[in-house]
Amino acid sequence: MSRPALQGILDAIGHTPLVELSKFAPEFGSRIFAKMEKFNPGGSIKDRSALSMLLERIHSGLLVPGRSVVVESSSGNLAIGIAQICRYFGIEFICVVDAKTTRQNLAMLSAYGARVEVVRAPHPETGEYLGARLDRVRELAATVPGAYWPNQYGNPLNPRAHRETMREIAEALNGQVDYLFSPVSTFGTLRGCAEYIAQHSLDTTVVAVDAVGSAIFGQQPARRLIPGHGASVPPALLDPACADDVVHVDDLDCVVACRQLVRREGILAGGSSGAAVAALLKIAGRIPDGSHCVMIFPDGGDRYVDTIYSDDWVGAHFGEVSHLWKDAPSGVPSSDAAGV
């Protein structure tokens, strides 16, 4: 039975497809699924978080068109999700980004009518842009009349949205979710999924997919090329107990996994989605045959065509590595063969 017509574009948020990846690793003894969050109207899983953090305040009259201003720090998917919602309701949005924000994302924010402020210097103490962006958001929140800062890094409404993400996954597989691979940044997605798993007593191993050079699980912060997972500062939503395992993947891991994914499955996935694939490959030998493994794919690859899917960009940062995906075997790649 088909769904009835939706009441506005925001009703399209959620209910994203769960896709079995039958061609990626046919010799792997378990079934692999991807939760395809690119099918949200703003193009990413962050639509869920944005809607959760804004909708109740809008319906309750705390956010009012013409009087209220949403202020948030984001250089990517959350910014686009918030911009879409604010445009729909006619609410002003000031987005604080940094100098690494892509031209494509800036163009999309402009198309939605967001006011963009660019932080061009990193934080003097940490050398990272996130701290500088947050400092500017705090200034705006304190001085702009009617300002509201959702604060994706510490707002409990962020993880609450992803209890629904996990509900969709669990219902699609009749509760048989043996492994969940969730890329982490604000920790909203993993925490919300873990809360649902605990509440419904699912026998699911939750694997946090983090970046090499991310500070979330105590690593020393280091330069990272690919956005979407990892963070230079541990988020306030962090609860290490929500993760049963942690797998760190580096930038090349993401590139190789993304290239293999589009080659084998015809799926153009974003960098953090590639990270989830790389994490699964790293621990594939520990996964019992017959398991159901679900990877959350936070966004698509259309926002990475100038980086991950650009041979020139990959060559400039990693050298000649095309052999890692062009002649890859069809089975489960080893860490040496796959570059992960």
Image: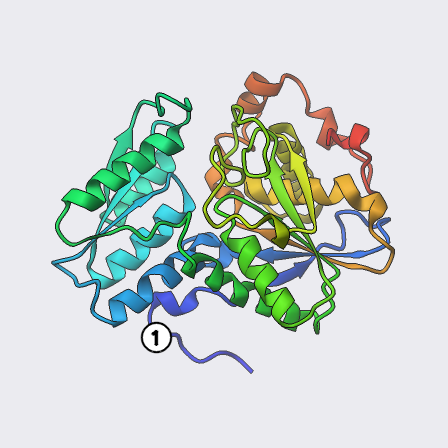
Left or right of 148? Residue 325 is right
Please state which amino acid type lies under the numbered disc 1: Gln
Q: Residue at x 55, y 45 (%)?
A: 184
Q: Left or right: 228 with respect to 30?
A: left
- Return the x and y of residue 215 as percentages of the image width and height: 54, 33
Q: Secondary structure at mark 1?
A: loop
Question: Which residue is found at the position 41% from the left and 61% from the top?
Answer: 157
Which of 38 and 286 lies nearest the eye of the viewer? 286
Q: Is residue 78 above or below residue 54?
A: above
Rate crowding at label 1 as few (under 14), some (14 to 19) or many (20 or more) other CA atoms within 10 Å. few
In percent of width and height, residue 273 lies at 59, 45
Q: Is residue 78 shown left or right of residue 17?
A: left
| Quadrant housing the N terminus | bottom right
Above or below — where is 141 with respect to 13?
A: above
Q: Which residue is more in the foreground, 293 or 217?
A: 217
Q: Position of residue 241 (x, y in %)?
A: 63, 52
Quadrant of the image occupied by residue 34: bottom right
Whether residue 300 can be seen here = yes
Image coordinates for residue 210, horizontal then vertical, percent = 60, 39
- Identify the residue under disc 1: 7
Q: Is residue 169 visible?
A: no
